[in-house]
Amino acid sequence: MLRSSPQKARRHITIKDVAKRARVSPMSVSNFLNERFHLMAADTRARITTAIAALGYRPNSGARGLRLNKEFSVGMIIVDPQPAYLVDPFISRVASGLSSRLAEMGYACTVQGLPDCDATNALFASHFRADALCVFASGTRAARRKLIESLARYDEPIVLIEETERFPKLDLMTVRQDDSGGAEQIARHLLSLGARSFLLMMPEPIWPANVAREKVLTTLLTEAVGPNRVMRIECGYGNFTAVQAILGRWLAVNKPVDAFVANNDQIGIAALRTLVARGIRVPSDAMVTGFGGFEIWHYSDPPLTTVISRAYELGHRSAEAVFRRLDTGRFDEREVVLPLTLQISGSTAIHQRE
Amino acid sequence: MLRSSPQKARRHITIKDVAKRARVSPMSVSNFLNERFHLMAADTRARITTAIAALGYRPNSGARGLRLNKEFSVGMIIVDPQPAYLVDPFISRVASGLSSRLAEMGYACTVQGLPDCDATNALFASHFRADALCVFASGTRAARRKLIESLARYDEPIVLIEETERFPKLDLMTVRQDDSGGAEQIARHLLSLGARSFLLMMPEPIWPANVAREKVLTTLLTEAVGPNRVMRIECGYGNFTAVQAILGRWLAVNKPVDAFVANNDQIGIAALRTLVARGIRVPSDAMVTGFGGFEIWHYSDPPLTTVISRAYELGHRSAEAVFRRLDTGRFDEREVVLPLTLQISGSTAIHQRE
DNA sequence: CTGAAAGCGCTTACAG
DNA sequence: CTGAAAGCGCTTACAG
């Protein structure tokens, strides 16, 4: 269940060493570390400062945490089958925003990528521990529910990132962006430009936000043009070569549609490049859209119409939510929803400058 | 120095609770957790298994670490002034490789982005603690040396990632790739295609690997064409719009060179798009190269000639180095160097298919 | 203002 | 095979 390895010989400098050197009691050092300077004479304080510097002392946060029942760390759980899970532009921004803000407040951020929900349970059953958890999960609704409900058993407050399921009875909140609204903007934009047939290009794994977007797209587009003109393919993990091959096979048996609607920028750009390589001009023959609005929308020719998300801010807000929860003992809101902006570029609108 | 917040009321399930419920002594539970099953009757083992599941018990790794003088975690320190430090394609791959491998071995990975070397010292002086440190640092040689030497004071083994400085007296090792070799391949490739004038496009911040590449490029290209035909500009943090503006200003006062040699793929693609937008054809009028070989080299038209690095593997290898060091008590090698592969694409070679 | 003592949850000798 | 005791490094009442 747990691993151990040969114990290290190194002996740490402790509060006692500092106390001895400064000729004070250990709890004066403790008071010093906790900034209770009013409890000591100016001279005591000065001697402790000197002793800490001279010995290179660092408090042992494990011992402190044990005493205080507090870890000074937040775990970020990312459920994603890809081992290079942090490479995803959305995830890397969320993780950056979260860890940067936590660091400012003196909290560590422990990242934990997990291939699926079962692995998570095994992990937690053993030893992972934090003051709070930020969970960014893929998978089916049922799998995610099961995961989140079992994490909640451990009594750590939870912030769900980009989750669409509701858990009214659990001690948690959701930080997300308005994915449905973003999808609606894409749909209205394409319809306004006269597109009448569509291919929705979906990534793996199943992210709840993608499901929400797809639902809105399907509803609005089907309403406008009828069900036979809204198609769908799975594009795997967004790897360029894989998307190229998948779309190539699709084009071998289907006529190009008016608009290729990708659910992320990586797939959108791969689609665009595949079309152009086959002599299908973008946007005059076919339009292409992405979702995310990360740097890469600039990279294709023409650049990609997309929706600018605020992934870094999602991470930042998640950290804020954790702090408030830890300070007040309760979540003061159930949900934070950030708005999204449509970025119209050359892949849908001719003469539009990037 | 340290922050504390209202103590939480929650009381954790402990080894004693499990022992009581299973009607055994606490140390039988401890033995169970440490998989010393030969020290207990089969019946004891079964009762403990049941009790752990029924109570939802998780070992407190902080307490265990305190006793064992072990944290079961590795810190990844990334010195980078950008708050979204994990977005960089190289860093995100290293971090993924490291954390995935650590997780497999039951270790947590705590990521810590720091704007500069001084901030690191402040952080460590307070409370950050781990069994080992993986350090991926930018900055001047002097600043990095100072940082690494001061981290070494804390007696935690250190793995340096992509570091070029040597520290023969410290308990550390380096995991890196052959950046000089990669740069040499780029230089020889461009010279073989007849390029006689060059613009080296350098990113911020200062990464030691970039300095190594630049040195080789400058030496080899200058040798071949003389010093006046090898120029250099700083391109900031690789942000598309910024690179576009910087290169635009440069082109306003300089004639295009034969080859634009970017030190990473982001800058390479931004350069390529800027040139094409101004009617300079790639590769016939000017060639462009990147470095990194991440997914995005496919995204431009033509795709980008680059060097395929193995950033994920660097992270993976760093984790392996940590495990060996923790097992054996010493680093058995001072350095691991991974080879690099030239990826020739349309931005340098006409008719070359991606 | 300063100090001795107890205890956070574990593990490890050491007795029974 | 099982149990009582000490101790990892801290903090927090509680006395002096």
Image: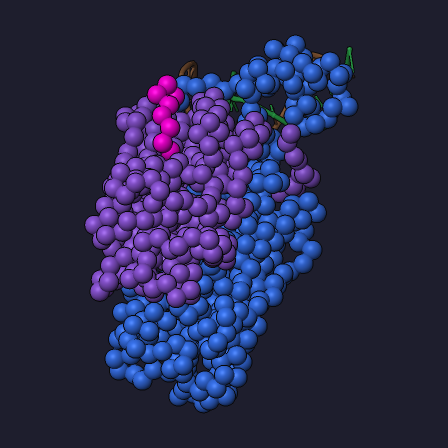
Chain colours: A purple, B blue, C green, D brown
In percent of the image, x 44 and y 73: which residue is there? B347
* Vertical comparison of A11 with B200: above or below: above
B185 relative to B278 in the view: left or right:
right
Q: Is residue A12 visible?
A: no
Residue B235: x percent and y percent?
34, 69
Please tell me in which quadrant of the rendered image residue B290 appears: bottom left
Chief SS of the magenta region: loop
Residue with the most extreme bottom position:
B226
Residue in front for this viewpoint, B103 or A196: A196
Q: Position of residue B130 (x, y in %)?
A: 54, 42
Q: Position of residue B103 (x, y in %)?
A: 57, 40
Residue B301 in magenta stretch: no
Magenta stretch bounds: A163-170
- Front position in the image: A181 or B17: A181
Residue at image location 54% in from the left, 28% down from the top: A121
Position above or below: B101 against B249: above
To which quarter of the image does residue A94 belong? top left
- Circle count: 0
For the residue pair B122 and A273, the one nearer the viewer reads as: A273
At horizontal 26% and vertical 75% (from top left) the residue drawn is B249
